Amino acid sequence: MDINDYRKKIFLNSQYCTYYNERNNTVLAGIMRSFGYRYSVILPDEKLNEINRNYRKFTTVMNACVAVEILLYIYLVIFPYFTEFMKLPFIVSVLLLCLIPLVALYLTYLTVNYLYENYLTRYVGTFQKTKFSPQLSNINEKAFLDYQKTPRKSVYILGILIVIFCLYAFIPVVVEKLNLNKNYKAALSLSNAYLTFVPVSPEVYANRAFAKFNLKQYSSAVKDYELANKYSLSDTFADDILGVKTYYLAKDEMLKEFDNAISSEKEEPVKYLLRYEKATYLLKNEDYAAALNIYNSILTDYENNTKVFFSPAKAYYNRGVAKKALGDVSGAKIDSLYSNRMCPECEFNTETTLVHRP
């Protein structure tokens, strides 16, 4: 097959091939191109040109309807009920997600095709339904030459789809980079724009929450972390939520949050982290005696080789701060020496370590 025949093959499978002549008959393509309409005569060029113009109008209407249906399905069904779909068995969710749009699209094809048939009956006359299967031998050369000169709308549509896909794929990466560079306002603005169109992205919710946290929009950050958990079908950001709450909840309420988190945690090493964070919260709120008791307990277990997840260097430093506040200056110096020896590059503070950059 030479290059010209290859191009003709592409033409035969495209929507630009709307008819062919076979013996003394013209066969027109249907909107659903698997079948066509056979006329008992060869139609004149004037009529074929008019039919082609109207065929393109009908296909444009059909494609527009399909695009609207897909958008409505995404924004009225998939996004609002995303978590419900994800909780269903895999096969059931796939069938529901595929079957509903396929039925809607098929009905759209049938409707537009029915209208097109009515148009052909009025404009040309009655026809016989047949299979639409043009061959290289009966290709219309004039139609093929017109096809070669016609701008390809599909190329522009493909370009638009590629741009949309790139935006969908790379904006979350850009938001993450903005947070990494501490450009929190830009990260927040870009996240807002992205989530307007894709409101089920857990990683973007988490990054927006982190940006809000650093902009001191604490209660709003908690809501975003909760949405990140919801759409990831997990409790991945439960610790982050707890950490953000330490910045705005009342002390009694926050201590209850810590106690509930500690009691519900199943992994023992993580319990130590939560107890460390509770002690740090107490230290930050100048409840030195209560903080010291917790630091003493968890550091004793650490010294006895118990597996823990908190940073021992930071725990020693913070215990030293509590001791100094309670008048134990020598004990504070010893803990400070321990912490600096264990982590000489660390910058110690009493801020939570529960909030992580996603």
Image (tube, rainbow, N blue to C red):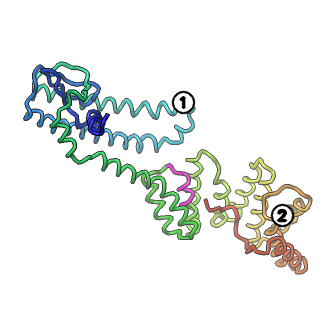
Q: Residues within 10 Å of mark 2 (few under 14, many from 20)?
A: many
Asked whether, in this view, residue 247 is left or right of residue 299, the answer is left
Mark 1: which secondary structure? helix
Circle number at residue 91: 1
Asked whether, in this view, residue 97 is left or right of residue 254, the answer is left
Q: Which residues are magenta?
A: 200-208
Q: Which quadrant is the C terminus positioned in?
A: bottom right
Residue in the image at 23% along x and 37% along y? 16
Residue 235: horizontal and vertical position, in percent? 65, 49
| Three-letter amino acid code of the residue under disc 2 | Ile
Q: Which residue is mark 2?
A: 294
| Dot placed on the residue nearer the N-terminal end, 2 or 1 | 1
Among the 4 quarters of the image, the one containing residue 274: bottom right
Residue 236: horizontal and vertical position, in percent? 65, 51
Among the 4 quarters of the image, the one containing residue 252: bottom right
Membership of 245 in magenta stretch: no
Asked whether, in this view, residue 94 is left or right of residue 335, the answer is left
Q: Report the Cα–Cα distance between label 2 and label 1.
A: 50 Å
| Three-letter amino acid code of the residue under disc 1 | Ile
Residue in the image at 18% along x and 28% along y? 20
- Nearer mark to the viewer, of 2 and 1: 1
Contact? badges 2 and 1 (CB < 8 Å): no
Membership of 207 in magenta stretch: yes
